[in-house]
Image (cartoon, rainbow, N blue to C red):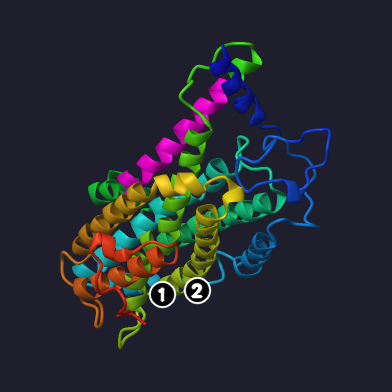
């Protein structure tokens, strides 16, 4: 019928191919996501980009993020770690475990959520997001080196991450959003397969609006990934190297390199969210407006989860001068306020009235 015919035209439009013969893809004629013939990809060329700023970020990430997992000296980490009291080891270890779990998501999610399966055929975006994902894999490799430097039984430590109830609770919300988006994309691909065999769609509820909702929510989650979720770990672990007797300096230096990379990722996704919110030609403006209440809810949930995590992080006390639960919570208030403001949201709507003070300059 006409309903299925319309849906068939939509889904076939996004059937993904590695390389399509025919007209050469012209960046200026694409959209960032779900543009005309987004399944049609062929020559990777960057001579006349529609989004030059994305190309610039890809180059910056390649220049800054091209460091080696072995360039930081970790030879003193085990001695320092073994000398920490129980509270210090807990703060360090909990943060490292969650960072490993989070980057294990970030090391495989970007291409799946924002490029493959007919989501985008813009050449400069493919270049950036591929570099982004590779950069996250470097972070995961670097965490492995940190674990090797400190723990006698690496397998035991790695296996303990998944079993940690606090990490499971903190990761559950993040994973639920990713699961929603990937389920939408998988159902769309099932519809494509059905249409290719002249069958009715298996999931007629998957429409252009559904796909845009999945992409936009995923962008919000990645934005919080890069700009918020890592920072409790970063700031707490940097504090070890800022004590009168500097500790865990190797780990601190690795975290600083990772944080520098994450700020580039954050800049890109902030610009993308703002563009989707304001540029009608991108086709997401109405979706972004409709999702605004849920966007605030996502930030509210993340904020409450970070509060619980901070309490857990310092549940055994703090041996760190200048860092404790109260200071880190004030820092989270500041970070949430800045990140929300930067994408056009009002932090007061989630109860942040005093988020202008940065206690960790």
Q: In this orientation, which residue lies closer to the viewer: 203 or 329?
A: 203
- Looking at the rendered structure, the secondary structure element under dot 1 is loop
Residue at the spot 41% in from the left edge and 75% down from the top edge: 76
Q: In this orientation, which residue lies closer to the viewer: 250 or 23?
A: 23
Label 2, on which residue?
73
Residue at the spot 78% in from the left edge and 40% down from the top edge: 42
Specify the principal SS of the magenta part. helix
Instruction: Tell me the number on the disc at residue 19.
Output: none
Q: Tag 2: Cα neighbours inside 10 Å, few (<14), some, or many (≥20)?
A: some
* Labels 2 & 1 near each other (Cβ < 8 A): yes
Label 1, on which residue?
76
Left or right, 48 with respect to 111, comes to right
Q: Which residues are magenta?
A: 171-191
Determine the image quadrant of residue 23.
top right
Quadrant placement of the N terminus:
top right
Q: In the image, residue 95 lies at what x, y percent?
A: 32, 62
Q: Tag 1: Cα neighbours inside 10 Å, few (<14), some, or many (≥20)?
A: some
Q: In this orientation, which residue lies closer to the viewer: 319 or 155?
A: 319
């Amino acid at each position: 019928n006409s309903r299925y015919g319309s849906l068939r035209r939509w889904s076939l439009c996004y059937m993904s191919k590695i390389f399509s013969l025919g007209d050469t893809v012209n960046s200026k004629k694409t959209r960032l996501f779900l543009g005309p013939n987004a399944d049609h990809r062929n020559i990777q060329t960057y001579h006349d980009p529609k989004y030059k700023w994305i190309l610039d970020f890809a180059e910056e990430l390649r220049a800054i993020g091209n460091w080696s997992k072995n360039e930081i000296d970790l030879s003193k980490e085990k001695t320092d770690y073994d000398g920490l009291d129980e509270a210090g080891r807990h703060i360090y270890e909990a943060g490292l475990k969650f960072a490993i779990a989070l980057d294990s998501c970030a090391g495989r999610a970007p291409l799946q959520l924002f490029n493959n399966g007919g989501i985008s055929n813009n050449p400069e975006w493919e270049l950036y997001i591929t570099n982004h994902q590779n950069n996250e894999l470097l972070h995961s490799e670097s965490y492995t080196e940190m674990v090797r430097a400190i723990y006698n039984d690496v397998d035991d430590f790695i296996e303990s991450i998944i079993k940690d109830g606090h990490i499971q609770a903190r990761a559950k919300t993040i994973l639920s959003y990713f699961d929603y988006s990937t389920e939408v994309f998988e159902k769309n691909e099932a519809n494509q397969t059905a249409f290719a065999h002249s069958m009715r769609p298996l999931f007629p509820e998957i429409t252009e609006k559904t796909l845009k909702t999945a992409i936009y929510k995923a962008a919000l989650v990645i934005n919080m990934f890069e700009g918020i979720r890592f920072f409790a770990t970063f700031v707490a672990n940097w504090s070890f190297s800022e004590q009168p007797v500097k500790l865990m300096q190797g780990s601190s230096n690795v975290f600083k390199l990772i944080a520098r990379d994450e700020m580039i990722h954050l800049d890109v996704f902030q610009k993308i969210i703002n563009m989707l919110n304001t540029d009608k030609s991108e086709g997401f403006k109405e979706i972004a407006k409709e999702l605004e209440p849920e966007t605030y809810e996502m930030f509210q949930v993340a904020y409450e989860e970070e509060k619980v995590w901070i309490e857990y992080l310092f549940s055994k006390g703090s041996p760190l001068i200048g860092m404790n639960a109260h200071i880190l919570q004030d820092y989270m208030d500041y970070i949430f306020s800045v990140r929300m403001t930067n994408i056009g949201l009002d932090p007061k709507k989630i109860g942040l009235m005093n988020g202008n003070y940065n206690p960790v300059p």
